[in-house]
Amino acid sequence: MRALLVMIFGLTLATPALAGGADDPVKAVMDIATGRWLESSTGADYFDKPAIDRLYSKAFQADYHAAEKYPAYDEGSPFDYDVVTAGQDGCPLKDIKIDPAGEKAGMTTVNVSFRLWDCAETAEEKARISTLRFDVVSEDGRSVIDDIHRNADGKWDSLRAEMHDIVKFGQENESKPQ
C-alpha cells in the first residue's frame, strides 16, 4: 500500500512537468527567433526535424510537409521570409513578452509581443511592437503549437492557411502545361 501511495504521489508530481505549460512550445519558438536575428546566428530553423516533431501539432506538421513540396526557392522552406517576425530584415529581438491568454475549447491562446527594429534609425521604427498569437493544443500529453497568427494592419493571418494556399498554388501550377 505504501509503495502504491509513493507511486501515485510520484506520478502526480511528474504529470505537470510532462505536459508542460501552454507557453513552453511558444518560448522554444521565440528562442529560435531570437537566435535567428543575432549577428552570430546559427541559422536554426523553426521547422527542422527535431523542432517540428517536438513543438507542433500533427495537423500543423501535415500542413507544413504538404507545403514543403513547393519550396519558395529551388530547395528548402516553402517560405521566403521569417514566419515569426513576418519579414526578411530586422534587428535582434527585444522586449519579448509571452502571455498565455487562457484556454477555450481545448485550445490555449498565447500572445507574444516584441520589438524587431531596435537597430532602426528612427524612434518610431524602434518603438514599433510586433504581435503574434499562437494556438496551442494538447497532444499525447504535451502542449504543441497548432497555428501561428501574425497581426498586420490590424488583421490576423494564419500560418496554416498560408500553407494551404502554398499547396493549392503549387498544385495548380503543376497541372499547367509548361
Image (spheres, helix red, strand yellow):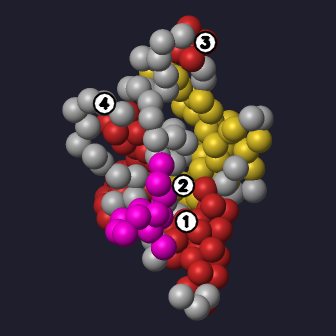
Which residue corresponds to mark 2?
145
Q: Nearer the viewer, residue 63 or 104?
A: 63
Which residue corresponds to mark 1?
60
- Give amino acid for label 3: Glu
Q: Which label sits in the foreground, 2 or 4?
A: 4
Of mark 3 and mark 4, the one earlier in the sequence is: 4
* Image quadrant in which you'd find residue 112: top right
Which residue does the image show at 65% across and 68% down from the upper left? 165
Which residue corresponds to mark 3?
124
Q: Which label sits in the foreground, 3 or 4?
A: 3
Marks 1,2: beta carbons within 8 A: yes
Q: Nearer the viewer, residue 127 or 17?
A: 127
Marks 1,3: beta carbons within 8 A: no
Q: Nearer the viewer, residue 59 or 122?
A: 122
Which residue does the image show at 42% across and 17% down from the upper left? 119
Of mark 1 and mark 4, the one earlier in the sequence is: 4
Of mark 1 and mark 3, the one earlier in the sequence is: 1
Q: Secondary structure at mark 4?
A: loop
